[in-house]
Image: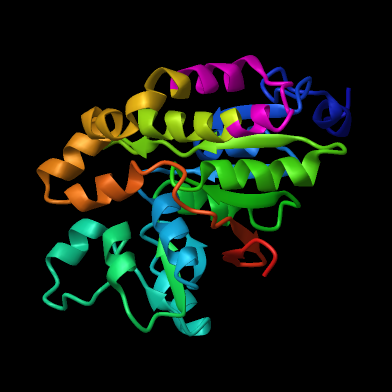
Amino acid sequence: MSRAEVDDVASPYDQSPHRVRFEWGPVGAAQVRADVAVVVDVLSFTTTLTVAVERGIEVFPYEWRDTRAAEHAVRHGATLAVGRFEALSRRDARHVSLSPATIAEAEGIERLVLPSPNGSTIAFALAGTGSHVVGASLRNAPAVAEHVAQRVWKGGSVVVVAAGERWHDDTLRPAVEDLWGAGAVLSGLVEHGLGDLSVEAGAALAAFESVRDDLPGAVRAASSGRELVERGFEADVDIAAEYAVSDSVPVLTGESFRPAGA
């Protein structure tokens, strides 16, 4: 069998028998392709993205700790956000970071380069793949589900990608808040009649339903939420745990996220 023939054989991991799929991290996003890709990074890329787009800010995703990020920002006439812990060491209180609270309070920003090791890196990698890429958080999950359902209603597939976090050795750490955020989007898709879920997607949906009645408490109790609260970012956790409070649907258009329909 030639290499081309091997490439044409469906992978057992691509979930292609189902229209609605779910996977983890950058490798999963590359493996499980679909017509629509929904990226979920609750703490905090897609939450920060949602807040930014709500405020009319155009957001450029970029890979984490890439020295070319500053050049990318200059090229697009954009502000470069830094990591939230890096921002703590800066004296300029106006400096924006991956913290959604800083974006909510920022003034005079029209374009923002927003690197992150997880959600932003995944979104950056998906640019140009042909997928319709959308950013989702708990804040806008129902709105994203409605947008996606309208797009694929007459045919097409969707994968919801939970970004996860990173261990110190840079391997993927599945983050339960991203599982819940993905499940929130999947719940909305089911409500809109897209019920052909893979087993993986069904598991994510079940995880969301198990905490739906107390999302703020669950996000705070999760490892990532506890870490941020202990390090002084309680406001970020509170913003990220808000459910269905935003109609903003960030869509990756070219190199940047803009509101759907813009």
x and y, in percent, of residue 3 in the image: 83, 31
**Which quarter of the picture shows residue 190?**
top right
The region drawn magenta spans 188-207
Q: Quadrant of the C terminus?
A: bottom right
Q: Is residue 68 visible?
A: no
The image quadrant where one finds the N terminus is top right
Depth check: give the residue in front, 92 or 173.
92
Horizontally, is 206 left or right of 154 in the view?
left
Residue 133: x and y in percent read 64, 51
Q: Residue at x 68, y 21 (%)?
A: 197
Q: What residue sits 33% from the left and 80% below the top?
A: 107
* Residue name at image x 55 percent, y 36 percent: 161
Looking at the image, is 54 positioned above or below residue 195? below
Dividing the picture into quadrants, the one containing residue 94 is bottom left
Residue at position x 53%, y 42% in the image: 141
178, above or below 236, in the image: above
